[in-house]
């Protein structure tokens, strides 16, 4: 009889301990730091190709100890401005988390969508010792510094119908500045760095940039021909870049 009483007492203490432990975990979860992710509202239905709108999305808080590998596969709530406005790659139902792989990022766009009539893309190697790609974005405008024959570089060939190169200011007599060109992509990046990061795109070497050139009558425009001619003569030596300020309204 005493054995049964002892067993019942032990079971009672065990249950009491379990209840106390559950209350402890609940209190701990309430105090634990949360990580906020982007979820789909309970009443929302997203189809493939639909644009993710702010009204579709809701903040989802998850205790840090339960996050696991979500940090690697799902954008955080702070990245909402970078997620809203992009089309979804799959269908969503309410209550699901948005995943990085389900968002079409600028890097996934076809470059042809950014080329106008009579325009082509040229890929140019850059001297990354003098170029900070993280401070430059697609649609920025740049020029290139082409060393001339005085420093061992190729002399530019005059192009029919084009004026000869103008003398450069003091300090640049040994080089020509050729441009401007609009940037299409840097490496595989066709958007701002933070957008690529929020979408989980892996950063690649950005020492090659794609620029836009006019292409008419089977020929590149004169400034692009000068760059490609230099690239051939220098065996694709990386070029130094000059970044131009953005054009303001009225300029």
Image (cartoon, helix red, strand yellow):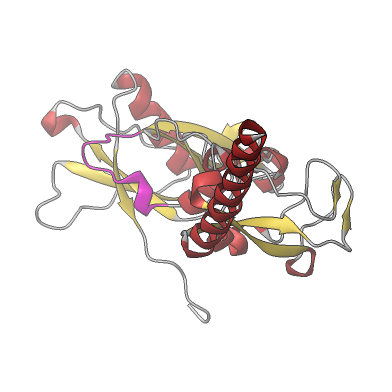
Q: State the residue lying farthest toward the bottom.
A: 250
The answer to whether 178 appears left or right of 77 in the picture is left
Q: Determine which quarter of the picture holds residue 85.
A: bottom right
Residue depicted at x 36% and y 36%: 158
> In the image, what residue occupies the spot 21% across and 28% down?
153
**Magenta span:** 126-136
Q: Compared to 245, does 178 lie above or below?
A: above
Q: Is residue 82 above or below residue 101?
A: below
- The foreground one among 249 and 47 is 47
- The residue most toward the left is 171
When the figure is inspected, residue 130 is found, relative to residue 22, above or below; the finding is above
- Percent position of residue 48, x then y: 87, 44
Q: How many marks?
A: 0
Query: Looking at the image, which is closer to me, 216 or 14?
Result: 14
In this rendering, would 174 be left or right of 120?
A: left
**In which quadrant will I find the N terminus?**
top right
Of residues 143 and 206, the one nearer the viewer is 206
Viewer-side residue, 94 vs 137: 94
Taking the image as shown, residue 73 lies to the left or right of residue 205, namely right
Q: Position of residue 108 (x, y in %)?
A: 66, 38
Q: Position of residue 70 (x, y in %)?
A: 58, 41
> For the point 59% across and 45% down, which residue is it?
199
Residue 93 visible from this viewpoint = yes
């Amino acid at each position: 009889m005493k054995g049964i009483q002892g067993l019942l007492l032990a079971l009672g203490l065990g249950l009491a301990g379990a209840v106390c432990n559950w209350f402890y975990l609940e209190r701990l979860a309430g105090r634990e730091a949360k990580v906020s992710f982007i979820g789909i509202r309970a009443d929302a239905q997203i189809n493939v190709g639909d644009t993710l709108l702010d009204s579709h999305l809701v903040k989802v808080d998850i205790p840090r100890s339960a996050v696991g590998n979500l940090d690697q596969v799902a954008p955080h709530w702070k990245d909402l401005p970078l997620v809203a406005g992009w089309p979804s790659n799959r269908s969503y139902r309410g209550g699901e988390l948005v995943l990085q792989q389900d968002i079409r990022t600028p890097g996934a766009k076809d470059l042809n969508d950014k080329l106008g009539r009579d325009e082509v893309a040229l890929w140019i190697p850059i001297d990354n010792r003098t170029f900070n790609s993280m401070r430059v974005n697609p649609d920025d405008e740049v020029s290139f510094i082409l060393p001339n024959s005085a420093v061992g570089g190729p002399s530019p060939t005059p192009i029919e119908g084009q004026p000869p190169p103008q003398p450069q200011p003091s300090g640049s007599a040994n080089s020509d500045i050729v441009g401007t060109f609009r940037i299409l992509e840097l490496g595989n990046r066709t958007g701002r760095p933070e957008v690529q990061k929020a979408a989980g795109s892996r950063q690649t070497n950005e020492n090659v940039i794609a620029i836009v050139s006019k292409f008419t009558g089977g020929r590149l425009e004169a400034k692009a021909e000068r760059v490609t001619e230099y690239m051939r003569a220098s065996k694709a030596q990386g070029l130094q870049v000059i970044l131009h300020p953005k054009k303001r309204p009225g300029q």
